[in-house]
Amino acid sequence: MATQVIMPKLSPTMEEGQLSRWLKKEGDKVSMGEPLAEIDTDKATMEMQALGSGVLRKILIREGESAPLGQLIAIIGEPDEDISGLTSQATAAQEAKSSTAPAEAKESDAPEAAPVSAPAATDNAVDQGAAAGNGRPESRPIESAPSGRLIVSPLAARMAAESGIDLRSVSGSGPGGRIIKRDVEELIGHGKSATPESGSQTPPRHLRVVPGSPFQKSATAQASAYRDEPMSEMRRTIARRLVTSLGPVPHFFLTIEIEMDRAAEMRKAINELEPELKISLNDVVIKVAAAALMQHPQVNASFQDKVVRYYEHADIGVAVAIEDGLITPIVRASDQKSLGEIATEVRDLAERARNRKLRPEEFMGASFSISNLGMFGIEEFTAIINPPEGAILAVGAMSPKPVVRNNEIVVRQMMRATMSCDHRVIDGATGAKFLQTFKKILENPLFLIV
């Protein structure tokens, strides 16, 4: 009997998946449990395993296409088995889905201002940016894209950006000429960078020629060229979760300023003694936050509809910026780990997060989160709580500032931290006491060994 391959739920927050790459082709033998395809979820690229044995008779969605959970995407069966009934059902479902698509989507086929499917970018002069070598994904050669559109899967665009590949020289093999992971892999395998010839002034066909641009010298003012980019699965999930956070969750914010000289000296001394550890200030912040959470268990908590859940250990989520958005890998039981263990684990988690290789249990279920933008020079900001967690700590930059000590003005390394609290879980005084303890330990890190 034929096995229906449906889009699986590969992460707790996944609602649809994008077929990144088929690992088998039609006619190949398949064994149960064998990797069948790679799926881009909202958080990672994961392998989908076959749930039956036989021959891959029919592939129903192509690489680069997305499908909701439960949709039939392939059929496994015996070589001579009749699967016409299943393929007819799949075709009917696809036609029904197409018939409900918004009519305005057809307008995107126009040569002017046609949409580009790629990771978010803010530079309108996209083809000039690529020529400068900044790694932004671009279109295929104009002669191979008659509609003037650039269609790139998010994963392929990220791989191209990381490898410095100009996608205008890539011929897409996906549906509608879509550039997919396999196309970029082939280019990387041949060692090509695909950099366009310098000095080219041919306008990219997916942008309108705007008066006053290098492509037209008229001074007539017109609306700016633009492009619409489909959201990645990760950005869609972020958008959905933010709606369920900042609105429904009653936030309040507490800010404290901390003298960081002793913490910075401790970090420097440890790294001089053990250079391979490479401890960062953020690692120190995680360790201190974990210690403070153990003293204030009311903050190490989450809202669970009819109950408040208190955690025995500090499972701290560490915000990591990646190509399509933000993910918070978790350092489990941070309160029981040394600074060296935390530093090593954070580096490993961050690296795998950027490569979309985290397992769901490694980014789901934190008891508290930390977001640090200090490395970007941000002195102070507020972060949005990741439900159902009760709080998130926003850490700013450490910088020298004049302060008054013993009636004298001296220069100290100061840092601001702002905690966003869910008022259903944490009261103002509770949050303030936690920050007092956090400040006390950071200013006197020897408390960590008491």
Image: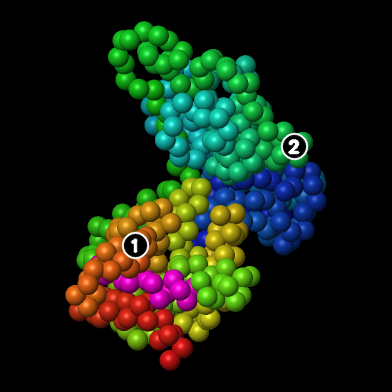
Residue at the location (53% across, 25% down)? Answer: 127
- Quadrant location of residue 253? bottom left
The residue wearing badge 2 is 191
Residue at the location (32% across, 77% down)? Answer: 439
Verify CB contact (< 8 Å) between mark 2 and mark 1.
no
- Quadrant location of residue 317? bottom left
Gap in Å between the C-alphas at discs 2 and 1? 46 Å
The percent position of residue 153, horizontal first and vertical second, equals: 56, 39
The percent position of residue 170, horizontal first and vertical second, equals: 65, 29
Q: Is residue 310 visible to us here?
A: no
Quarter of the picture containing the N terminus is bottom right
Query: Relative to the observer, which residue lies in front, 77 or 26?
Result: 26
In the figure, is residue 378 to the left or right of 83? left
Query: Relative to the observer, which residue lies in front, 438 or 154?
Result: 438
How many neighbours does mark 1 have within 10 angstroms: few (below 14), some (14-19), or many (20 or more)? some
Secondary element at tag 1: strand
Secondary element at tag 2: loop
The residue wearing badge 1 is 400
- Amino acid identity at mark 2: Gly
